[in-house]
Image (spheres, helix red, strand yellow):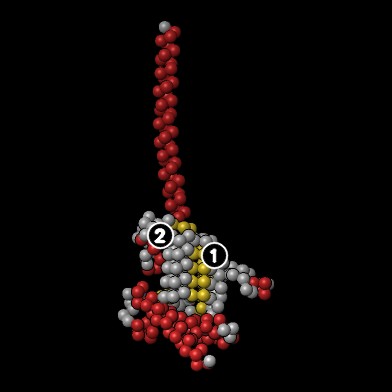
């Protein structure tokens, strides 16, 4: 029974890590081969400790799972709670400073850059009441989170969405859009098909315009159009008044 358990663990972890390596090779042009990823990528080293500690967490061996995750944090500077649920081909690029909270759920083909936080917003007081509650974000398949971004609370980021660098996200983000700013606001893509493609650091071909400035520019354009329309109507009104006066003079004569 123990040998079968060890065999199943080894097979499961090896298969999942093999797919994680494929994710690095697919999305990082600096990765020249599998052995380079295995030896030189701290993000992948963090995934090794996470996959093992998560298996222990599922077996309710909580203390050893937390200790193994702590060792991984010391080695890599990346903190992933063993209770988090992480899908296939997960990539942490550059890695250092990433934090993934206990109740985080991450889909397949997700990419996080350095200094990303998937955190909670609940206060530390009365922490017992929060045990077993969803406190951290859920990221859909293909999500890209730029460096320094913070996604906080039990919110959802839709599949293939992008979160720009240093953004702070506290509300749900729809699929296939880009969220930027503090607090983050959604920028709708011009090409929804291209929005599903991988873009390093969650950038877009259109850049990442400030949604607030976009709104101001839109309002300014509307005011300009309305002013032109008012001038046109005032001109017509003056023509009508002049015509009425001319007709009145003709009647009097």
Q: Residues under labels 1 and 2: Cα distance? A: 22 Å
Mark 2 highlights which residue?
208
The C terminus is located in which quarter? top left
User: In the rendering, at what x and y percent does residue 196 appear?
Assistant: 39, 63
Percent x, y of residue 81: 54, 78
Q: Is residue 224 visible?
A: yes
Residue 252 circle label = none
Tell whether 37 sits left or right of 72: left
**Residue closest to the eye, 218 or 119:** 119
> Circle 1 is placed at which residue position?
155
Taking the spot 38% from the left edge, 84% from the top edge, the residue there is: 38
x and y percent of residue 246 in the render? 41, 15
Residue at the farthest top position? 253
Compare residues 94 and 135 and report the one nearer the observer: 135
Res. 16 image quadrant: bottom left
Badge 2: how crowded within 10 Å, few (<14), some, or many (20+)?
some
Task: Where is residue 61? Give x, y as percent.
Answer: 58, 86
Q: Quadrant of residue 45?
A: bottom left
Q: Please tell me whether mark 1 sits on a helix, a strand or a loop.
A: loop
10 Å crowding of disc 1: few (<14), some (14-19), many (20+): many
Residue plotted at (56% across, 75% down): 102
> How many labels, in total?
2
Q: Nearer the viewer, mark 1 or mark 2?
A: 1
Sequence-first tag of 1 and 2: 1
Residue drawn at x 54%, y 65% is 155
């Amino acid at each position: 029974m123990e040998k079968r358990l060890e065999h199943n663990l080894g097979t499961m972890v090896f298969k999942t890590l093999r797919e994680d390596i494929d994710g690095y090779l697919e999305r990082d042009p600096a990765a020249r081969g599998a052995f380079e990823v295995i030896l030189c990528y701290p993000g992948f080293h963090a995934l090794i400790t996470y996959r093992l500690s998560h298996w222990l967490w599922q077996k309710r061996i909580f203390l050893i799972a937390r200790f193994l995750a702590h060792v991984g944090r010391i080695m890599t500077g990346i903190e992933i709670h063993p209770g988090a649920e992480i899908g296939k081909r997960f990539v942490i690029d550059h890695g250092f400073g990433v934090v993934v909270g206990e109740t985080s759920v991450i889909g397949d083909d997700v990419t996080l850059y350095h200094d990303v936080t998937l955190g909670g917003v609940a206060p530390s007081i009365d922490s017992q009441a929060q045990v077993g509650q969803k406190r951290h974000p859920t990221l859909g398949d293909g999500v890209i989170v730029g460096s320094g971004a913070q996604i906080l609370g039990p919110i959802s980021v839709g599949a293939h969405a992008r979160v720009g660098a240093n953004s702070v996200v506290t509300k749900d983000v729809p699929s296939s859009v880009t969220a930027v700013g503090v607090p983050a606001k959604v920028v709708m893509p011009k090409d929804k098909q291209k929005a599903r493609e991988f873009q390093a650091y969650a950038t877009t071909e259109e850049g990442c315009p400030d949604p607030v400035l976009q709104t101001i520019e839109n309002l300014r354009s509307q005011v300009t159009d309305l002013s032109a329309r008012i001038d046109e109507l005032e001109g017509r009104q003056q023509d009508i008044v002049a015509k009425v006066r001319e007709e009145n003079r003709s009647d009097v004569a």
